[in-house]
């Protein structure tokens, strides 16, 4: 057993990989952190700028987003793509985003890391009781291996010598928020770099990439401790997301938003593509949810957020003003 993987109701760091088109969602996330995150458990807020040229994005964040963190602004640190990759990149995207979610844990100082996307925002208080069970294990929501991504899990399992029938009944989620012991990820990176004699970034980003970030972490976990339950306790769902890659119609959205009334749910996620599609009924439902939890004070403020996101969803560079 890896005792240094036990996080025991201590502190957590937040890691968000962000880029230009999603900064208005990051702004909402920052506001939600100020409103709902317990200051006693919050360590660093690590913002990874997933852009080859990060200067304009960092300036926009400092000007327009840092104030939203309120008293937590001094806990924010910036990490660039070049710092994590170890080389200057000509382009960044979904692949680098995945790699950076793992590599950014090197900048964490807390025993536990919570990995987020810009789309995630908190809707209820997040303290030790939301993150850890009474026995100190990390709370995780029910999840299964997703059939269309199963080959990624099996590739990671094979890499770490896990039998094909192990870990398939219940798994760590493949979406954010994703909670993981910081030391576990450090050990994963170290093992892969020793095995491959290359940097983790080189291994993860090779042309015929066979891993996704969260299945890689999960396969490594079960290869070392045997089962999910050693470190995690599966509890009722605590996160609801509207994903652009899924079927999104007003009925589906209303069903998901109704789930936000469950007291265990503390995180809501709205992918930018859902907002960019501009369905007025869906936008109205999201507005109602944001107002219900106090993230915006008026319909007009919600519309401003949504319009900015819609206008900038496909642009490379943008500014709030």
Image (spheres, rainbow, N blue to C red):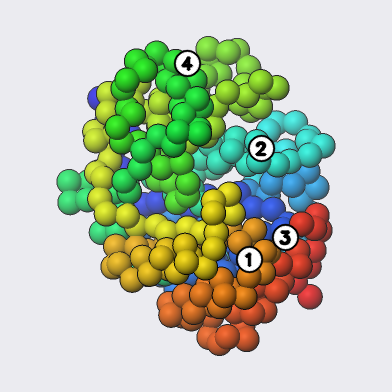
Indicate which label's residue lies in the foreground, 4 or 3: 3
Residue at figure coordinates x 38%, y 69% from the top left: 258
Can residue 185 be seen from the camera position used here? no
Alpha carbon of mark 4 to alpha carbon of mark 1: how far?
38 Å
Residue at figure coordinates x 67%, y 69% from the top left: 278
Element assignment for label 4: helix
Image: 164 above or below 172? above
Q: Which mark is residue 96?
A: 2
Indicate which label's residue lies in the foreground, 1 or 3: 1
Q: Is residue 296 left or right of residue 308?
A: left
Alpha carbon of mark 4 to alpha carbon of mark 3: how far?
36 Å
Indicate which label's residue lies in the foreground, 2 or 1: 1
Disc nearer the start of the sequence (4/1):
4
Answer with the quarter of the image where residue 37 lies.
Answer: bottom left
Disc nearer the start of the sequence (4/2):
2
- The crowding category of the residue bearing disc 4, from other C-alpha atoms within 10 Å (few below 14, some 14 to 19, many at least 20), is some
Cβ atoms at labels 3 and 2 below 8 Å apart? no
Disc nearer the start of the sequence (3/2):
2
Q: Which mark is residue 159?
A: 4
Element assignment for label 3: loop
Element assignment for label 1: helix
Cβ atoms at labels 1 and 3 below 8 Å apart? yes
Alpha carbon of mark 3 to alpha carbon of mark 2: how far?
18 Å
Q: Is residue 127 left or right of residue 321?
A: left
Pointer 3 residue? 313
- The crowding category of the residue bearing disc 3, from other C-alpha atoms within 10 Å (few below 14, some 14 to 19, many at least 20), is many
Q: Is residue 245 left or right of residue 123?
A: right
């Amino acid at each position: 057993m890896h005792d240094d993987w036990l996080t025991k109701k201590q502190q957590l760091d937040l890691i968000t990989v962000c880029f230009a088109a999603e900064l208005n969602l990051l702004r909402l996330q920052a506001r939600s952190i100020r409103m709902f995150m317990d200051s006693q458990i919050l360590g660093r807020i690590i913002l990874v700028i997933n852009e080859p040229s990060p200067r304009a994005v960092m300036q926009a964040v400092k000007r327009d987003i840092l104030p939203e963190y309120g008293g937590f602004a001094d806990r924010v640190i910036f990490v660039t793509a070049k710092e994590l990759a170890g080389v200057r990149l000509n382009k960044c995207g979904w692949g680098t985003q995945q790699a950076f979610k793992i590599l950014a844990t090197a900048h964490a100082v807390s025993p536990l890391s919570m990995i987020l996307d810009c789309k995630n925002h908190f809707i209820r208080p997040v303290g030790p009781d939301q993150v850890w069970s009474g026995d100190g294990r990390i709370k995780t929501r029910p999840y299964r291996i997703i059939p269309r991504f199963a080959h990624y899990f099996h590739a990671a399992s094979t890499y770490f010598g896990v039998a094909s029938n192990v870990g398939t009944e219940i798994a760590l989620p493949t979406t954010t928020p994703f909670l993981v012991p910081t030391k576990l990820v450090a050990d994963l990176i170290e093992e892969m770099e020793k095995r491959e004699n290359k940097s983790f970034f080189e291994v993860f980003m090779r042309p015929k990439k066979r891993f996704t970030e969260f299945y890689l972490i999960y396969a490594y976990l079960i290869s070392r401790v045997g089962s999910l339950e050693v470190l995690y306790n599966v509890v009722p769902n605590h996160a609801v997301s509207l994903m652009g890659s899924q079927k999104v119609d007003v009925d589906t959205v209303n069903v998901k938003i109704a789930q936000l009334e469950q007291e265990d749910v503390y995180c809501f996620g709205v992918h930018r593509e859902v907002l960019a599609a501009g369905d007025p009924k869906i936008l109205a439902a999201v507005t109602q949810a944001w107002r219900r939890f106090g993230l915006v004070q008026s319909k007009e403020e919600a519309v401003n957020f949504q319009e900015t996101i819609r206008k900038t969803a496909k642009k490379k560079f943008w500014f709030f003003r």
